Amino acid sequence: MSATAPYAGPSPIRRPVAAAALLAALLSLVFGLLLAGAGPASAHAALTGSDPQDGAVVDTAPKEVTLSFSEAIAVGDDSIRVLDPSGKRADTEAEPRDLSEGGTVRYGVALHSGLPDGTYTVAWQAISADSHPISGAFTFSIGAPSETTVALSSQEAGGGPVGVVYDIARYAAYGGFVLLVGGSAFVLICWRGGASALPMQRLVVRGWLTLTAATLVMLLLRNPYTGSGKFADAFDLAGLQSVLDTKPGAALVSRLLLLGAAALFIAVLFGTYARREDEQERKDLTFGLAVGGGVVAAGIAATWAMSEHASTGIQASIAMPVDVAHLLAVAAWLGGLASLLVALYRTPDIGSAAVRRFSAVAFASVVVLAATGIYQSWRQVGSWSALTGTRYGQLLIIKVALIAVLLAVAWFSRRWTGRLTDASAASSGAEAASSGAEVVFSEAEEADAATAPDEASDDVAPERAAQLARQRAVLTATKKKRIRDADPERSGLRRSVLAEAAVAVVLLAVTTMLTSTEPGRTEEEAAGGATAATAPAAGGPVNLSMPFDTGGRNGKGTVRIDIDPGRTGSNDLHVWIDGSDGEPMDVPELKVALTLESKDIGPLPVVPDRLAEGHWTASGVQIPMAGDWKIDVTVRTSDIDQVTIDKNAKIG
């Protein structure tokens, strides 16, 4: 609700202006500080390089294929697969070797010896240090590119139906955490009488049930989510054991254990604490529950911090406790908001003092959220381009905008809070409305009693008593509802809090999406490290003319070369040889080779076929990467006279 200090009475019209100025200052601070410079920060791991490179053509088969990543990853037996043109495994199918040294994260797999020429596909899948599955594929060629029958699944790691269910469980887990922690804090800090209110009990218990069920689903689906993508593997004991050995698996198990302690906390809060009447004993119990519940809540929040974005990148030892504080502030604010909404709509007993106490709690929560949010954004974004040009940055903008809307709605709630009257005062306004119904009901009771026979049988009296009890219960509920609705300030507050809750639901969904989105800084780093071979570059036909002299008889002439269309991918090569007299000249042998020295690619041999006198051609010449290529041409004019000439040309 209101993210401001408790209401202190009416104020001049300057109050909206001051609130708007405070909001503008907060937004400026967020966007200014989050873009301050910082060292590299990682979250989702990204492939930063490979040997052979993507699209490279090598002369001889390498002994192994290595992949480099931006951060530590977890790998399994089939994390890196190398497939030959027919789709068969070209690697030894052993677990990838950890070749990391210093700050470089690199893994490699050995290849079979004697691999034939052709195009090979490298498919990889791993789990980044922040628990999210990642995958990708690229190709390289031995000798020369060839056709390949390899067809990889277009489904990304963590996708498919299993991914959908897993993501739903993630959203439910955050929602359950907010209701459990926020609802409990609302009862202990703002409205202790809520411990005996059935709607409040249901809210907190449902939060606990939702979080527990979601955690169990995530634990069971973790293996297929990061691996096969099949629901049947959820009950694979070997797979479950492997999950328990990972950081995310340990975090989920720890959360379940802490939820057991949370169940005991709930039992005491809505049992012993609700029945305790002695004020001093209740005060002591409040302190004990606050300390114990705070420890459990912080522990549950830490299960997210230890396995997601906060646990990787720079300053992880600072980022993790900051993330815990951020989650607790979110729960106190949004969970308290949900509790207030339930109390206003379902109970007539909550008073203005409790609402004002929540106003103070909400204000403190927003302060913590602003401080921790700025720090987290600084780690994960770091530049204007990442803020506006990446999905993470765009979601962050939406989140800040939603917070601004929530604060604006909260300002209206604060106004209603200042006018709020307690239920006892409001009851006088509703007494007249309900007294008529009571009189009618009393007269009906008297009439029934008068017409009933004095010697009513034992069988009839209990039934009549039960009927009267039900009627009294309905009348009491109607009276309470009229009392609750008779206060216009309370009705206005309910409407504004309902609007806050609607915005809060969207805000919580966006926040959950951020936790599973690759941070902007990492996305930009990965994009900056991508090679040009990942997409064909635009170019134009290449035309070269090179004079030659083999030193023998009739050994002088000119070689003319056309490469069309002159870009990465497949090209047509035409070679014309003219003698010293300008006429077409035949030679016994002609060879061409292409080398990209800046990337250590090549020489890539090309053997053109004779098409006509003095004219040779080759189709399907593969240019794997754009760059400044050196074109070598070997011309032999006799058994002993030959020469190799070269010239550089920009291709692609």
Image (spheres, rainbow, N blue to C red):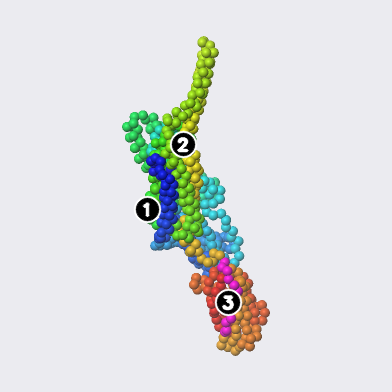
Does residue 544 belong to the magenta stretch?
yes
Which one is nearer the viewer's eye here, 236 or 531?
Answer: 531
- Camera sees residue 252: no
Task: Give the x, y percent position of residue 289.
Answer: 36, 37
Which one is nearer the viewer's eye here, 351 or 306?
Answer: 351
What residue is drawn where x is 67% and y is 79%?
Answer: 612
* Quadrant housing the C terminus: bottom right
- Residue found at the very far bottom of the displayed protein: 553
| Residue 318 - label | 1
Tell me how many marks there are: 3
Task: Give the x, y percent position of residue 267.
Answer: 41, 34
Which one is nearer the viewer's eye here, 213 or 237?
Answer: 213
Question: Mark 2 or mark 3: which comes first in sequence?
Answer: 2
Query: Disc 1 marks which amino acid?
Result: Ile
Residue 616, relative to residue 433: is it above or below?
below
**Tag 2 secondary structure:** helix
Classify residue 54 as left or right of residue 608. left
Residue placed under numbered mark 2 in the picture: 489
The answer to whether mark 3 and mark 1 are in CB contact below 8 A is: no
What residue is drawn where x is 48% and y is 32%?
Answer: 486
Residue placed under numbered mark 3 in the picture: 592
- Residue found at the very far front of the displayed protein: 12
Task: Give the x, y percent position of residue 597.
Answer: 50, 73
Between tags 2 and 3, which lies in front?
A: 2
Classify residue 297 as left or right of residue 58. left
**Tag 3 secondary structure:** strand
Magenta stretch: give its range. 536-548
Query: Disc 2 marks which amino acid?
Result: Glu
The CA distance from mark 3 to mark 1 is 59 Å
What residue is drawn where x is 52% and y is 46%?
Answer: 168
- Camera sees residue 136: yes
